[in-house]
Image (cartoon, coloured by chain):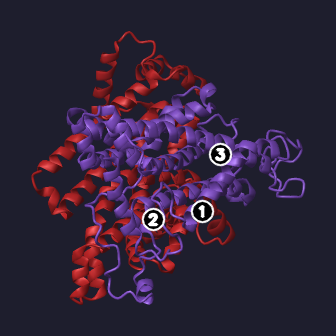
Amino acid sequence: MYVISRRIGFYILTAIAAVTVDFFIPRVMPGNPVSAVLAKMQGAVITKQTLAALEAQFGSNTREGLWGQYLHYWSNLLHGNLGISTSNGMVPVTTVIRGALPWTLGLVGTATVLSFILGTLLGVLVAWKRGGWLDALLPATTFFQAAPYFFLAFLAIDLFAIKLGWFPAGSARNTLDFPAFDWTYISDVLDHAILPALTIVVASAAGWIVSMRNVMITTMDEDYVLIAQAKGLPKSRVIFYAARNAILPSISGFSLAIGFVVSGALLTEIVFSYPGLGFILLDAVQEADYALLQGIFLVITLAVLVANLAADFVYVFLDPRTRQEA
Amino acid sequence: MAIGSSTHLGAAQADADDPLPAGDAPARRPRLRLPRSPKVAIGLGMLIVFGILAVIGQWIAPYNPARTFSTTASFPQPPSLAHLLGTTQQQQDVLSQLLAGGRSTLLVAFVAGLVATVGSVVVGVTAGYVGGLSDDLLSMLANFFLVMPALPLLIVIFGFLPASQGGDDLLIGLIIAVTGWAWGARVLRAQTLSLRRRDYVESARIIGERGWRIIGFEILPNLIPIVASSFLFTVLYGVGTYTALAFLGLVNPNHLSWGGMLFYAQVAGAEQSGYWWLFIPPGLAVALLGTSLALLNFGIDEFINPRLRAAGLSRRRARRAGVTGAARLPRRFVLGVTPVVDAGSPRNGNPR
């Protein structure tokens, strides 16, 4: 379909641009990343190959031209080679990321879906009961939205994990090795995931509530809602008809929101020592592990692009107007 | 022409205001003003307090925020009379840090908001007004920045920034602005597109006004509420992003800010050890600052789209007031999806 193919084209271009940005940042910024990495690696044995690999990665001390480096970078990327992680004993960056990615996907994915559903439902309710006591919910959710995610995470740990002792205060599971994939393991993982997920949901639901409420209020003034009411349809049916139309901007606004949620979730992971991408991101920052830093940026960007594409698919599926040739 | 446009919008305003129970203000002139809702009042008041504290905080702080009070104590000390909010792991006074740390946070956020808003106006209005290929390219650029997750990008940029430049407020604000202008540009472009086709802009073009004059005097004044909203949104974004970057230790940790205080709280293991005075004051400050900006933004939203105002729109309240049916609800003024904007009237009656 025309719309979808155009969107896919845009996302491919964006992905290429993201890779290009990723390539240029270490070359444009002042300072010498190689010496910074070496300074951080004091004590480690640095072979000639390591040095050469680092220099190739950041484009210093090399005779290859910029264009050649760029092509080289792409060819490495397409072969799944993101460089070596200096802070994790010289293992490939892809290995480090592969270990952390499932945790982030599980946590952020679940929390995002939950907060979207919860926020949208609450937004419908607040709009329908406009002028009632539920309007007081708005300033409260505003506070949670304005508070940094990691501050809420601090509060959640202090209250629910330390003072009340309901949930574990950090990490993703109790045992370090992977036991049998049985109920003990699953419940353990869930137990560790509830508090961080709850933090993300509470922090991000406010955005969905406000946007849904605002569109819903406008939609409720449409003629077809009035007709539905005049026909004497049950209230739930009327709300359903209005909400079905009001949800479209929320879905198309997904691209703006998902970036925020992912960024916030990364920080939440850091506070909870949750072994996802955010956690190794902090490691990478502190250890000046630039290859890992760049790799995580690429993976997150691509994941966000894929999520956006999925939202676009849903949008085209839900709104028949977009399927017509413009 | 100016009169024609302002009466048209004035009528819309009067009609939208009609169902409001506020009959106490006789002959209100449509002026650029915010609705007198408690949300706006609280938001504005809080923001002013934060602004004043940012300026004078350093002077009213009881101690030098960098002063170390004890070399023997190795744990953060809880609040006491000498230190109302306790001390940090390094035995520095938390209250002094809190008061002095606001300046950097606000400065970075406002620089980011200002630069990003100027950028979004330039890009958005140009794209909307000029159209054609430049519209396609500029929209593409904005969409690109919109889908790019900003924080990871900023982390990569700051990660490569040498430590010596990590504490420059203006530079930090500028870099944050690079990732924060796209949303405003998209909204402004959409509104410019719709304004461009309005009669008064068309007639200005037919009269032979120059392009920059049409943009500056016909279109921009009508965009002011949206520009203001996008400015507040970007400042809010700047506060959150700067705090996050400082929390990660990407900003020079010796550069005092609320995010930096949270960084040290995390380093001290505050949430695990119950040192609440290390993370609650700076976190609450950031959250309240953000809330004040968001509340103001609500006010502007309600100004742009009168239907969002809660007062007078409650069906129940309307019924209680004896209004039968929904006839008096503001249903007639549906100008497409375009919100009713009545800015430019300060120059009402000003001969062009």
Are the residues flagged by discs 1 and 3 in contact, CB closer than 8 Å? no
Chain in red (letter) = A
Above or below, A246 against B120 in this view is below
Q: According to the image, label 1 marks what residue?
A: B41
Q: Amino acid at mark 1?
A: Ala
Q: Which mark, by number, is residue A18?
A: none
- Residue B240 place in picture, x, y as percent: 55, 49
- Residue B242 place in picture, x, y as percent: 57, 43
Query: In the rendered view, does B238 fall on the left or right side of B271?
Result: left
Mark 2 vs mark 3, CA separation in Å: 25 Å
**In this view of the protein, which residue sits in the foreground, A51 or A326?**
A326
- Residue B318 place in picture, x, y as percent: 42, 84
- Residue B112 place in picture, x, y as percent: 52, 39
Q: According to the image, label 2 marks what residue?
A: A205
Q: Amino acid at mark 2?
A: Ala
Colour displayed for chain B in the image of the structure: purple
